Amino acid sequence: MSALLWALVALPLGAGVLLLVVGRRADRAAPGVALAVAASALGLAVTAAFRHPSARAPFLDGLPMRLTVDGLSGLLAVTVTAVTLVVLLFSAAEFGSGEARARFFGLMLLFAGSMLVTVTAATLPVLLMGWEVMGATSWALIGYWWRDPERTSAADTAFLTTRTADLGLYLAAGAALASGGGRNSNSSLSLDGLARADDPWLSFITAGLVVAALGKSAQLPFSFWLSKAMRGPSPVSALLHSATMVVAGAYLLLRTGPLLDASGWGDDVVAWTGAATAVLLGLVAIAQADLKQLLAASSCAQIGFMVLAAGAGATTGGTLQLVAHAAAKSLLFLAAGAWLTALGTQQLPALLGAARHHRTVGTAFTVAALSLAGLPPLSLWAAKDVLLAGALERSPWLYAAGLAGALLSAVYSAKALWFVWRPAVARPDARRIPAGAVWPLVLLAFACVALVVPAFPPVRDSVSRVLAASGQPAPAAWEFVLSAGLALLAAAGAWGWGARPLPLAARVKSGFADWLGLERAAHVLLVAPTMRLARAAAAFDDRVLDRAVEGSASATVRLARWTNDVVERAVDGTVGAVAAGTRALGRWARRPQTGQLHQYLAQAVAAFTVLAVVLVLVR
C-alpha cells in the first residue's frame, strides 16, 4: 500500500526533474513522456482514492515523513491528476516545436507532483516541502517566457506575494512545536492533531494557517497576485488556477476544519473572508475588459465560496465546489488560450464572434460559462447550493452574502458569453485551432455536466461518508429554485445590457477594473516602507558602518607606522642592549676559564672566604 502512494508522488516528480535535466534534447519526446506520466498518475490516484494508503519514512529524529490518502485528499488527488492530464493533452497540440517543451512539460509535472505531496501530506513539515516546491515551480511557469521583462516581473509579484503569506505556515509549525513542548513532535505537527493544541499556541497555529491559505488561494487582501499570474501561458493558468495552486489554500482550510472550530474565531474569519472575496472579486470580474483577467477575478470569487464553506463547516459542499470549479475553470482558461493563439488577442471587444468562428470551442466555452453562472442543470449550480446550505445554517447574513456572490457569477459569465457570441467580424488572418487542442475541451465540457450528479442524493450522501463529514446540512428544494432563478435573471439582465458602460462614477469603475487597488495598497503599505527601510539601512551602511570600518583601518595603519617608527626602534634598542650585555658577561665569564689548576684552587679559596665572611656578618 505504501508503494502505491510513493509511486503516486514520485512518478511526476521524477519525470519532471528528468525532463528539466535533459533539457532541449528531450523537446521532441517531452509531450509523449509527460502524457504517459500524467495518465499513469491518474490511474494511481484513482487506485489510492479507493484503497486509502499510508506511507512513512525516516526524516528527522522523532519526526518521520508521513503521507496518507483519506476521503478528501483522495478526491483532490484524482481531480489534480485528471486536470493535469487534460491540460497536458491540450498543451501537446498547442505548443509548437520551437518552444522549450522539455522545460515546460518538466515544470508542469514537477508542479503537479508537488501539489500531490501537498494534498497527501499528513504532517506540517511534509506539507511545507510540497508547498515550497509548488510555489517555486509556479514562479517558473508564470515566467516561462522569461525573455519578456513584464512576464518575469509578474512572476516575481505572484511569487513574493504568496511567499509573504507562506510565512504563516512557519509560524504555525513553530507554534505547533511549542505546544507539544518538544516531547511528541510527531503528534503536535500532525495535521489531524493541530486542533488539540492549547492556547495561546492554538490561536497562533490558526492564524498562521489561515494567512498562508488565504495567500495561496488569492483571497482578500492577497487577490491581486492572480491578476499578474495571467501573464503566463494559458495551459499554466488552466492548471495552476483551476485545480491546483489556488485551491491548495481552500483544501487546507477544508482539511483543518476542526482547528478553525476549536480556535473559537477562525471559522467566522474564514467564512466572512470567503464571502467578501466572492462579492468584491465578482465585481472586479464584471469590470474587466480582458478575458483572462475576467477569468482570474472569477477564480478568486469562486474559491471564495470554497473558503466560505470551510468556515461554515460545509465540507461536502466545499469539496463539490472545488471539483466542479476545476473542470469549468480549466476549460475556460484553455478556450481563452486557444482563441489567443488563433486570433492574437484576449481583449473582450476584439473577441466579438470568436465562438461563432470556432464553433466547437465556443460551445465548450459556453457550457463552462453557464456552469460558472450557476445555471441548472450544470455542476456549479448544485454544488454552490450545497455549500450555501451550510452558510444558511450558520447565519442568514452569510447566506445572503453568498447568494449575492452567486448572482454576480451569473453577471460576469453572461458578459463573457455576450462578447464571444456576438455577430462575427471578418477574420481573414485567424489561425486554425488544432483538433488535438479541441478534444480536451469537449471532455471538460462533459465533466461540467456530469459533475452535477454528486450534488444530489444518494451520491451526495456517499460523498459525505467518504469525506467523513457527518451531519452536513442539505439544501431544500426552494434553495435550488431560488439560486437558479436569481442566476437566470442576472444572466438575462447582463445579456440584455450588453457592452453599455455601467452607470457608475469613473473612480468606482476604475477601482474595480484595477482590482480594488490592492497592488497599489500593498506597495504603499509594505513595499514602499520596506524599500525605504532598505535604503536607510544602505545609507547607514555607507555613511556610518563603512566610514567606521575605513576609519578603523586608517587608525590601524597609523598605529602600525608609529609602532614601526617608535616602539620597534625602542624594542630593537633594548634587544640590542641585552644582547651586548650578554656578550660582555660571556667574555667576563670566560676569563677565569684558564685551564690551570692552581688558579681554580685560588678562586675556590676566595669564594669560600667570601662565604665565610657573609655567614659571620649575618650571624
Image: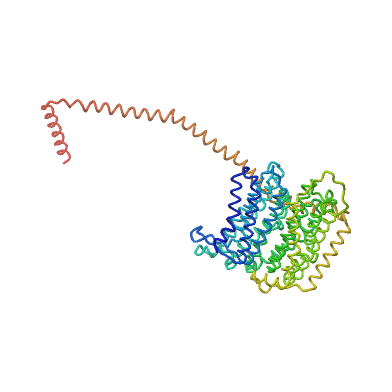
Residue 223, image x and y in percent? 72, 55
Which quadrant would the N terminus be assigned to in this image? bottom right
- Exactly how many numbered labels are in the figure? 0
Quarter-wise, where is residue 252 in the image?
bottom right
Residue 87, image x and y in percent? 70, 54
Residue 260 visible to the viewer: yes
Residue 106, image x and y in percent? 63, 49
Q: How is the image coloured?
A: rainbow
Residue in the foreground of this view, choosing between 269 and 40: 40
Which residue is depicted at the point 25% across and 28% down?
585
57 vs 609: above or below: below
Residue in the foreground of this view, choosing between 98 and 577: 98
Which residue is depicted at the point 48% across and 59% down?
61
Which quadrant would the C terminus be assigned to in this image? top left
Residue 225 visible to the viewer: no
Residue in the foreground of this view, choosing between 88 and 418: 88
Residue 463, image x and y in percent? 67, 69
269 vs 514: above or below: below
Q: Is residue 105 left or right of residue 442?
A: left
